[in-house]
Amino acid sequence: MPKRGKKYQDSAKAVDREKLYDVKEAIDLVQETANANFDETIELHIRLGVDPRHADQQVRGAIVLPHGTGKTKKVLVFAKGEKATEAEEAGADYVGGQEYAEKIQNENWFDFDVVVATPDMMGVAGRLGRVLGPKGLMPNPKSGTVTMDVKNAVEDIKAGKVEYRVDKTAIVHVPVGKKSFGSEKLYENVKTLLDAVIKARPAAAKGRYLRSITIASTMGPGIKINGQKLTE
């Protein structure tokens, strides 16, 4: 195990590793322990009581955080005609069809964070599954990225829409803002995300759903949140 830096060690001393903190208390503490010389991203890591190997226990969705994430995402839209024009007017960074599919396949081009596609363009986007899928970039109706309403899709993404998706270890990892947001904005973002994940609980999930919740800054220690209180 590599030795941690002095800043991390100092920050870790402020955190009781055995304690389950209330959400607001944890948010105050994560800001206090974010001591890097840049505006650190604050992330939430939620371990769920689901088995992601089963289709009926998948947890996936998207939510617009009230205060965004602090990062403006680059959006690629596969659309044509009127829908392409709508996407451009809504602020999409790249809009097109086959030319972008070929650029991704032939040039290993990934200068974008989110891909949106109209249903009639999924024939083009679908062929990119092998390269977009492993990066979590494949358009999907559940996350609102396969839609005819490209205007709202692009505007929501630019406004701070984030996708949450359980990984193969049953954990959801989502950025919820920046240290500079302050406690109130971070709390509203965290609460919005947690409410969405709780609401998305699959009917097939048995036992305790929120197994553990940890909040951490980019370079700081993890702080455990009391998830039991959130579902009472």
Image (spheres, rainbow, N blue to C red):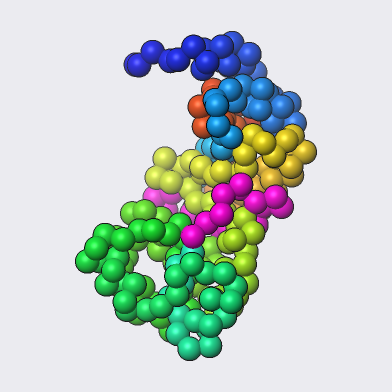
Residue ranking furthest to the front: 37
Vertical arrangement, residue 190 with respect to residue 94, above or below: above
Vertical arrangement, residue 162 with respect to residue 207, above or below: below
Q: Residue at x 45, y 85 (%)?
A: 80
Q: Is residue 156 left or right of residue 75?
A: right
State which quadrant residue 38 falls in.
top right
Closer to the camera in the image, 205 or 170: 170
Closer to the camera in the image, 163 or 50: 163
Q: Residue at x 52, y 56 (%)?
A: 73
- Residue 39 location in percent, x, y? 58, 34
- Residue 95 location in percent, x, y? 45, 75
State which quadrant residue 138 falls in.
bottom left
Residue ranking furthest to the left: 106
Q: Is residue 186 left or right of residue 139?
A: right
- Magenta stretch, residue numbers: 52-74
Q: Residue at x 51, y 42 (%)?
A: 173
